[in-house]
């Protein structure tokens, strides 16, 4: 059975609702303004040595501290409003783990992979992502313990914007983090369900299974800077990431550059803003304070960072909001993108 070409085109057009067009236009305008270039994989500035080996999930700070309870479970000393806001925001995170990854029917072939990819990317924006890209699956980035239940070919990487105003109050910021984990979980689940309904296997994941940032880089969502997080052209570091592993025949995106690596060489704003001293000064290094071997990059100290979170009783995002790329650089493009989307929907263009 084959996917009908004409129907794919109709659905692609139909998925262009106002919020989807707005997100696509916003990305296009921002990337043009920032002079974003597409790279080949070997042009990505961080380097990987021959002795690189897969990172163990057991070395992640959340795994190391799991016996002492996650932060959302450590809210006993907080006032009732703060506790309520934070607990509520995390309510749906991990909901994606409840479903199967198996294709829901026999595979439906697509003659046009490019068109199928466009439909899946638009569906991702429709179901709630703010950014989407496709990366080839590279098992080097999977945790050493992770064995995918099927032969994964691509990773659909989903980005979710954290609100620019959320850092004015520590409790609201913590609730914003939780809310985005819930959004990640819901959207990743919906996107995987959609792919499964086309006859392909699809496994939704948040932070589990693999490192997510390398896949986000391969999918062209952004670059990695001094603070170790993904920095996107659209929202800077104010993004959370989820992913869907699949064997659907997709067309991958390319990595991008807007000069972040060079900028970080001469900018220490995130390191200056970190109350835990967890972000390094100086050039990138092969030494990893997280225990990763064989990658040249800036490496934050996750224990210092998490110890600070435990001290304050909730998460922190001071580095995220200190980065110049995270500020509202693009207000006028938001307005332009919104206007363009509305004109398109109402038949003005
Ligand atoms: S989250 Fe806070 S403590 Fe952790 S690296 Fe960023 S600024 Fe430092
Ligand atoms: S604050 Fe400066 S050094 Fe840190 S990631 Fe952003 S641009 Fe790079």
Image (cartoon, helix red, strand yellow):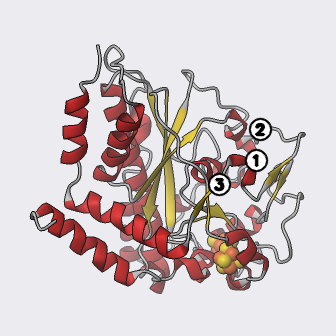
Quote the CA–CA distance across marks 1 and 3.
31 Å
Q: Secondary structure at mark 1?
A: helix
Residue designated by label 2: 54
> Which of the two discs, 2 and 3, sits closer to the camera?
3
Seen from the viewer's position, the closer of residues 348 and 51 is 348
Mark 1 near mark 2, Cβ–Cβ under 8 Å? no
Query: Residue 121 at x, y = what percent?
Result: 38, 46
Quote the CA–CA distance across marks 1 and 2.
11 Å
Residue at left offset 51%, top offset 54%: 241
Q: Secondary structure at mark 3?
A: loop
Residue 59: mark: 1
Query: Residue 36 at x, y = what percent?
Result: 56, 66
Chain-order first, disc 1 or disc 2: 2
Query: Residue 8 at x, y = what percent?
Result: 25, 34
For residue 145, what is the image quadrant? top right
Q: Is mark 2 within 8 Å of ligand 1?
A: no
> Which of the two discs, 1 and 3, sits closer to the camera?
3
> Which of the two discs, 1 and 2, sits closer to the camera?
2
Residue designated by label 3: 39
Q: Is 195 left or right of 263, judged from the image as shown?
A: left
Query: Residue 208 at x, y = what percent?
Result: 58, 42
Residue at left offset 61%, top offset 76%: 312
């Amino acid at each position: 059975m084959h996917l009908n070409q004409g129907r794919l085109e109709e659905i692609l057009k139909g998925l262009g609702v106002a919020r989807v067009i707005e997100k696509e236009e916003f990305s296009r305008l921002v990337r043009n303004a920032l002079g974003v270039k597409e790279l080949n994989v070997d042009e990505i500035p961080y380097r990987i040595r021959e002795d690189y080996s897969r990172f163990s999930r057991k070395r992640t700070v959340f795994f190391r501290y799991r016996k002492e309870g996650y932060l959302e479970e450590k809210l006993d000393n907080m006032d009732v409003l703060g506790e309520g806001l934070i607990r509520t925001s995390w309510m749906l995170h991990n909901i994606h783990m409840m479903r199967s990854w198996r294709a829901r029917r026999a595979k439906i072939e697509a003659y046009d992979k490019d068109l199928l990819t466009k439909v899946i990317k638009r569906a991702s924006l429709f179901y709630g992502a703010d950014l989407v890209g496709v990366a080839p699956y590279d098992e080097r980035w999977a945790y050493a313990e992770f064995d995918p239940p099927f032969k994964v070919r691509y990773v659909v990487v989903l980005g979710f914007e954290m609100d620019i105003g959320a850092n004015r109050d520590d409790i609201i910021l913590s609730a914003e983090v939780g809310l985005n984990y819930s959004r990640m979980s819901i959207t990743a689940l919906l996107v995987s369900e959609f792919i499964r309904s086309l006859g392909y296997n699809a496994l939704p994941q948040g932070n589990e299974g693999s490192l997510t940032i390398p896949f986000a880089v391969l999918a062209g969502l952004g670059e990695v800077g001094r603070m170790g997080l993904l920095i996107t052209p659209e929202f800077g570091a104010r993004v959370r990431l989820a992913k869907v592993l699949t064997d659907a025949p997709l067309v991958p995106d390319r990595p991008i550059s807007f000069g972040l690596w060079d900028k970080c060489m001469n900018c220490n704003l995130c390191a200056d803003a970190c109350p835990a001293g967890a972000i390094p000064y100086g050039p990138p290094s092969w030494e990893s304070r997280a225990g990763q071997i064989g990658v040249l990059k800036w490496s934050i100290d996750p224990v210092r960072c998490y110890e600070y979170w435990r001290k304050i009783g909730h998460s922190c995002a001071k580095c995220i909001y200190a980065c110049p790329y995270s500020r509202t650089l693009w207000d006028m493009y938001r307005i332009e993108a919104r206007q363009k989307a509305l004109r398109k929907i109402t038949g003005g263009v």
